[in-house]
Amino acid sequence: MAYKIAVIPGDGTGPEVIREGLKVLNAVSHVYGIKFDFHTYDFGGERYLKTGKIIDAEEIEELKQYDAIYLGAIGHPDVKPGILEKGLLLRIRFDLDQYINLRPVKLYPGVETPIKEKTPEHIDFVVIRENTGGIYTGHGGATRVGTPDEVTTQVMVYDRKTVDRCLKYAFELKKRRNQISASYAAKPLHLVHKRNVLTYAGDLWFRAFEEMGQKSYPDIPRDYLHVDATTMWFVKNPEWFDVIVTENLFGDIITDLGAMIQGGMGIAAGGNINPEGVSMFEPIGGSAPKYTGKNVINPLAAIEAARMMIDELGEHKAADAIQKAVATTCTRLKSLSAGKMGYSTTEVGDMVASLIS
Amino acid sequence: MAYKIAVIPGDGTGPEVIREGLKVLNAVSHVYGIKFDFHTYDFGGERYLKTGKIIDAEEIEELKQYDAIYLGAIGHPDVKPGILEKGLLLRIRFDLDQYINLRPVKLYPGVETPIKEKTPEHIDFVVIRENTGGIYTGHGGATRVGTPDEVTTQVMVYDRKTVDRCLKYAFELKKRRNQISASYAAKPLHLVHKRNVLTYAGDLWFRAFEEMGQKSYPDIPRDYLHVDATTMWFVKNPEWFDVIVTENLFGDIITDLGAMIQGGMGIAAGGNINPEGVSMFEPIGGSAPKYTGKNVINPLAAIEAARMMIDELGEHKAADAIQKAVATTCTRLKSLSAGKMGYSTTEVGDMVASLIS
Ligand SMILES: CC(C)[C@H](C(=O)O)[C@@H](O)C(=O)O
Ligand SMILES: CC(C)[C@H](C(=O)O)[C@@H](O)C(=O)O
């Protein structure tokens, strides 16, 4: 039996990095005897500009038939910000109920972090970002647009069920990680919010966190941090963290900062997870128009996304093989930044593929 | 004539750092012949716990009679988060219409930043945070609280006037800074938002930014950044920034990160500005309960707040004298962190006061 994978290369450098990810998956396929059945979709800015179509209900239904989705990048310089993001990326996240955004923040040996005195043992945590609620629901609106009396609202909506299912995922992940290493187990599960200002939503998250912890995970220490302070500790004391759980918007912000301290967009990947359904994996960098077609973009983030995908599919050994190959490759590149790797996109993909064993 | 200053030492270490700030203002008073008339208010957690009173309408009216307000810290471990913040700090910001939060992010020579390869010339910018709108308005609510069906909303509200007056302040500040140095002038005014997701509010901010820039400040280059990406560039390329303007919540988050890259809570200060009314100045750190009463907290942030206050009052020479004294003090301290300065709180205050000339 083969895993059915929907591949959405998307815009800009998306196709270039996905090509290398597929190369590595093919290498894994040979070595580990895993079969993949890839189907490519042309969703993205080019198709939208040509046809006016982003994605329709039928195509969404089709995506639900896959075992996983592998996404490159979405975003086109000629399309107004918001259209493709909301119409495609967020639409898939919402319609497929991918309610967890899983973002490992891990500094591989040999990778340069912009913060001082931190080594791989200091930067090794995971952010669980709620992925289908909050201000991303799109609630709100605008009146008297374009006049001096324009008023806009954006509504952060959270209900208990949305909060609870996200917290449950985080507690379960923390439980698993605590079994992996004593150093993980020594750290609490962190809830990040802004409950001193967002008192309605913050209170809901905090109460749900305390109740679930007390009742179902009494052995897991809990801690709470404001989102503003969290950005400080990411830079000053990333070793405090093991698993962080947070709401959608705050998660968006702190995971980008997390990407930077783990070496930047060249390496950072994320999963949009529906634990009971179809999940989607992506490098978290954008479509990087200025590097498009130059064969200089770093494909490691896309390769990491592929690793997360097969790990989620249950292929842990093969996932570990990719991780080892990526880690080795990191020690060989001059830099993880586009154009400064000392190798082309294709060569980096070849290197990882050849290291799969 | 004397400047009438309302002093709110507040909670925790607030009184300790305000005491040093007042010491420095008294030194300035002697050297520059500026007179201050200080009135102290006991607003804060202690009073609230004793009397149940936070601040009332009459006291708010009284505050409006001052030339400025000098605040220590608000927040008490025995008071539920949100009560004092909303009841006191945000209430003053809102009722006195302090619609600008001014946050200089400047690395002084001799101060340790946690990011690599950055020196004072790389970290010298100002964040203009809108301070009376957005999700801080408190719009929203909760239903079926404590049940499995609880739903909460928090509403980010922005109208064109609120956006425009903030942008105007930012463009004017940028214009002034461009005249100070060619290196400032070489950088754009940055708008930070999340307009690819918060399309209603982001569109309002972006349109207002573009229109005001094109019409009234055509010589000032403009740039736009998403808030998530901004956290990355603060850490990787802080030298890109001169003046940043952003909405309230995003400003809250990025200014804390800004505080960290300029050396932390020991040095970071901010102003809550009503350009036509009464402004309030504060060190941006919290009440730091664990350091309270130990004479180990760093008073430089509170002294910086005092500097910003008299600068806003028009006493630029005296403000510059404080800045010089603070800069010199920075080169003498072992660290800016509480308990690690190599000097006590009192000694640091004495040092700055003695350097005023
Ligand atoms: C492109 C954008 C809509 C998206 C988000 O805000 O979620 C991105 O920043 C991310 O983190 O995946
Ligand atoms: C204490 C809190 C309400 C406040 C805010 O969120 O504005 C603080 O973080 C700040 O930045 O001044």
Image (cartoon, coloured by chain):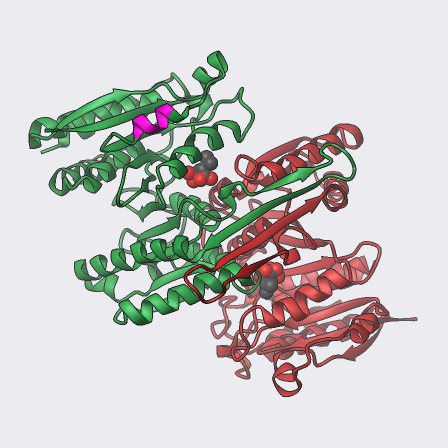
Chain colours: A red, B green
Please identify the quarter of the rendering in which residue B273 is found: top left
The quarter holding residue A99 reads bottom right
Q: Magenta residues: mostly which secondary structure?
A: helix
Q: Residue at x 57, y 66 (%)?
A: A285
The extreme top residue here reads B50
- The front one of A159 and A26 is A159
Relative to A264, residue B346 above or below: above
Q: Nearer the viewer, residue B90 or A277?
A: B90
In the rendered view, does B111 fall on the left or right side of A37? left
Can residue A295 be seen in the rendering of this structure? Answer: yes
Q: Residue at x 68, y 32 (%)?
A: A207
Q: Residue furthest right?
A: A1
Q: Give the residue displayed 48% in from the left and 53% down from the top.
A: B158
Q: Would residue A66 appear left or right of A81 to someone viewing this image?
A: right
| Whole-percent x, y for residue A5 in the image | 80, 72
Pick whichever, B10 or A335, lies toward us: B10
**Residue B326 shown in magenta:** no
Where is residue B121? Give x, y as percent.
27, 55
Q: Is residue B150 above or below residue B164?
A: above
Q: Is residue B261 left or right of residue A179?
A: left
Residue B266 screen position, x and y as percent = 35, 34
**Quadrant location, the C terminus of chain A:** bottom right
Number of marks in the rendered image: 0
Q: Where does residue B279 sit, x and y in percent of width and height?
A: 29, 38
* Residue B296 visible, this angle: no
Residue B100 against residue A306 in the figure, above or below: above
Rendered-image quarter of ligand 1: bottom right
Residue range corresponding to the magenta coloring? B58-63
**The N terminus of chain A lies in quadrant:** bottom right
Q: Where is residue A262, by image quadrant?
A: bottom right
The residue sitting at 40% across, 26% down in the picture is: B57
Closest to the observer, A121 or A22: A22
